């Protein structure tokens, strides 16, 4: 799928970015403080200090037993490699609806499509990653849902997966590194998570 490109001519110099991605680059949708689209930016550029606020999504999927599917990000990723995180995170192509992007990217990364996917609000954050020197400045669309198929992860994206209960998640977080955004998006998505997976969460 070729990403659509939003106009950037009217952006201020500090937000302006190339209007088309070079081969191998990925464009993100830049947004203002209210979540309205204001242009596009190359993915790495948007994550370099001081960062540019852009649209993102985070997915939390659960199995029939109410366990959350976590993924450990592939070691080869330039951003947050090798850490545990929620089921799937990513960025819509410019002009792509976040719901569509969330379903698409979950399937691409985990080899299994959500059986159910529901919107669970939005959250905005500015979170530096001390390990990589990058920063997450994101307007994040949250989704919760169910997965019934066995994951078959893409090795270039996902190092490992694990289904965990709430207690197992607490134990894992105490001993293993997680993505810098995990706590923020998890707390923001909790009302939706509890509707899907019960009040044990």
Image (spheres, grey):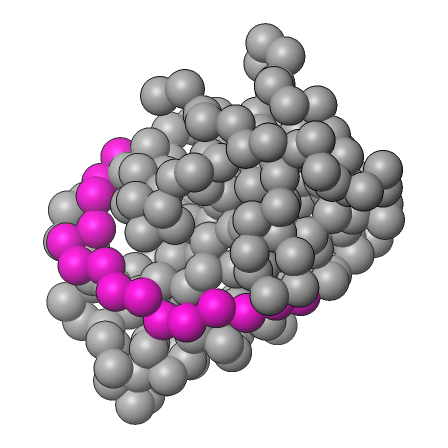
* Relative to 183, 53 lies left or right: right
Specify the principal SS of the magenta part.
Answer: strand
Reply yes or no: does residue 148 show up in magenta. Answer: no
Q: Is residue 198 visible in this depiction of the protein?
A: yes
Is residue 16 shown above or below 175? above
Q: Is residue 83 visible in this depiction of the protein?
A: no
Observer-nearest residue: 158 or 20?
20
Residue 138 sits in quarter = bottom right
* Relative to 126, 141 lies left or right: left
* Relative to 186, 38 lies left or right: right
Q: Residue furthest front?
A: 10
Residue shown at the point (81%, 42%) measured from the top left = 12
Reply yes or no: does residue 123 show up in magenta. Answer: yes
Give the image location of residue 196, x and y in percent. 23, 76
The span picked out in magenta is: 110-125
Give the image location of residue 128, x and y in percent. 79, 56
């Amino acid at each position: 799928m070729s990403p659509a490109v939003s106009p950037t001519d009217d952006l201020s110099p500090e937000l302006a970015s190339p209007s088309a991605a070079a081969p191998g680059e990925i464009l993100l949708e830049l947004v203002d403080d209210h979540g309205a689209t204001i242009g596009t930016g190359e993915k790495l550029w948007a994550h370099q200090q001081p960062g540019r606020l852009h649209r993102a999504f985070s997915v939390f999927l659960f199995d029939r037993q109410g366990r959350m599917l976590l993924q450990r990000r592939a070691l080869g990723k330039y951003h947050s490699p090798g850490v545990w995180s929620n089921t799937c995170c990513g960025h819509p192509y410019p002009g792509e609806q976040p719901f569509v992007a969330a379903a698409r990217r979950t399937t691409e990364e985990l080899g299994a499509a959500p059986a159910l996917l529901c919107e669970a609000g939005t959250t905005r954050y500015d979170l530096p990653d001390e390990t990589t020197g990058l920063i997450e400045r994101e307007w994040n669309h949250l989704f919760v849902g169910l997965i019934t198929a066995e994951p078959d992860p893409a090795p270039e994206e996902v190092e490992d997966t694990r289904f965990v209960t709430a207690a197992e998640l607490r134990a894992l977080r105490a001993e293993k590194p997680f993505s810098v955004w995990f706590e923020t998006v998890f707390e923001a998505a909790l009302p939706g998570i509890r509707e899907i997976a019960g009040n044990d969460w």
